Amino acid sequence: MSEPDEDFAAMFEASLQAKRFEKGQTIEGTIVAIGPEVAFVNVGGKGEAMIELDELKNAEGVLEVVAGDRIQAVVVSTEGGLTLSRKLAHGAATLRQLEDAFRARLPVEGKVERAVKGGYEVRIARQRAFCPISQIDTLRGADPAEHEGRVYAFRIIEYKEGGKNLVVSRRALLEEEQRANAAEIRRSVVAGAVLTGRVASVREFGAFIDLGSGVQGLLHVSEMGWSRVSDTAQVVTLGEEITVKVLRVDDDGHKIALGLKQLTADPWSTVQARYAVGQVRAGRVTRVAEFGAFVELEPGVEGLAHASTFAPTGRAAGWSRSVAPGMTGEFEILSIDPEKKRIGVALVQEGSARDRETTPSRTEHAEYQERKDAEPAERFGSLADKLRGALSPREK
């Protein structure tokens, strides 16, 4: 083979090896030779990369490596072979290298020095850069100072005034990584799985939980606790790490229902063993409806005090004026239905006859329950009677 053919073969081999790597990729290699301006690095197999000698010198201009040393560097070019930069990997790049990184969309290392108005001041090499607050992360944290002092990889999104005005984004790199990993994360999200995520946003109806790589699920307010939750912000906080259970996943995996209360025991599972008709328990009125008041007897267990149980007004509309959410008192257990998760209660009044064999409140409550259970059958019977009445003349 002639010398030109050998040169062409070498260049062809180098181009093939370069295709194994991508710009921005961090790789390790061994220095095999050091020339007057560049050094050659073995990156595995027959692959060989080039790195400028200035990249291997310290601040005093002294060469820090010798042949045989292993180094870590970033791929800055794959055209006609591999070109590496160690300073980009270590956050000590020159202005020219930062410009190259901007044009090639390569990541650079920077240290978040402090939070400022609208974002953060970031030190990259010897340059100061600005990172808008919306670009520091994919999730908005509760405390802006949590990023101070951290070293992150950034992408330069604006390069002005010869590098004196730099705007960087960490979010751009995180979102690229998320897109690459989202499919794998979705495969792990199946009904029944217990996962850890971060609270991405808090709303009145619940909270969105980031399960990783931008995959989010909804933790509805009704699934936050066994007791009624009036303020979601009292249960979860923005940016908080939280463990949840996957309740449902739709066919394409884009709607994920999560639960928090399912990680603790349902208090109704032991109600029958702990409650009995005739017991008196402390309770708190949680809400008032036209037909009665709901009373929390313990977290997750509510009873209903029917309007008829409030003396002396009884069924009169005025009973509700003496009852308000937040009111506490002693309540007598009138009935228990663990399967339907229903408990009937009555407020114990001073001087009441609750110790008698049958109190007015208990009797009226029992009558109400009997009427309620019988209503569907009565309605059906009434309709049947009307039909018979309508048909009887014809039969005659």
Image (cartoon, rainbow, N blue to C red):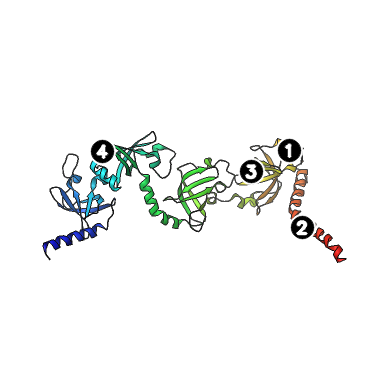
Q: Secondary structure at mark 1?
A: helix
For this orientation, the residue located farthest to the right is 396
Disc with the residue nearer the chain's start (1 vs 4): 4
Disc with the residue nearer the chain's start (2 vs 1): 1
Residue type, label 3: Glu
For discs 2 and 3, the disc positioned in front in the rendered view: 2
80 is higher (above) or lower (below) than 352: below
Count neighbours of disc 1 (C-alpha within 10 A) and say few if under 14, some if 14 to 19, many if 20 or more.
some
Q: Cβ–Cβ below 8 Å for labels 1 and 3?
A: no
Disc with the residue nearer the chain's start (1 vs 3): 3
Q: Which residue is mark 1?
A: 319
Q: Which residue is mark 3?
A: 296
176 is higher (above) or lower (below) than 168: below
Q: In the drawing, what numbered circle is on residue 105? A: none
Q: Which residue is mark 2?
A: 380
Is 69 left or right of 225, judged from the image as shown?
A: left
Give how far apart the Cα atoms at labels 1 and 3 are: 19 Å
Q: Which residue is mark 4?
A: 162
Q: Secondary structure at mark 4?
A: helix
x 60%, y 46%: residue: 300
x 80%, y 56%: residue: 382
Residue type, label 2: Phe
Q: Which quarter of the figure has residue 7?
A: bottom left
- Viewer-closest of 342 and 392: 392
Give how far apart the Cα atoms at labels 2 and 1 are: 33 Å
Give how far apart the Cα atoms at labels 4 and 3 are: 67 Å
Give how far apart the Cα atoms at labels 2 and 4 are: 86 Å
Q: Cβ–Cβ below 8 Å for labels 1 and 4?
A: no
Residue type, label 4: Gly
192 is higher (above) or lower (below) than 202: below
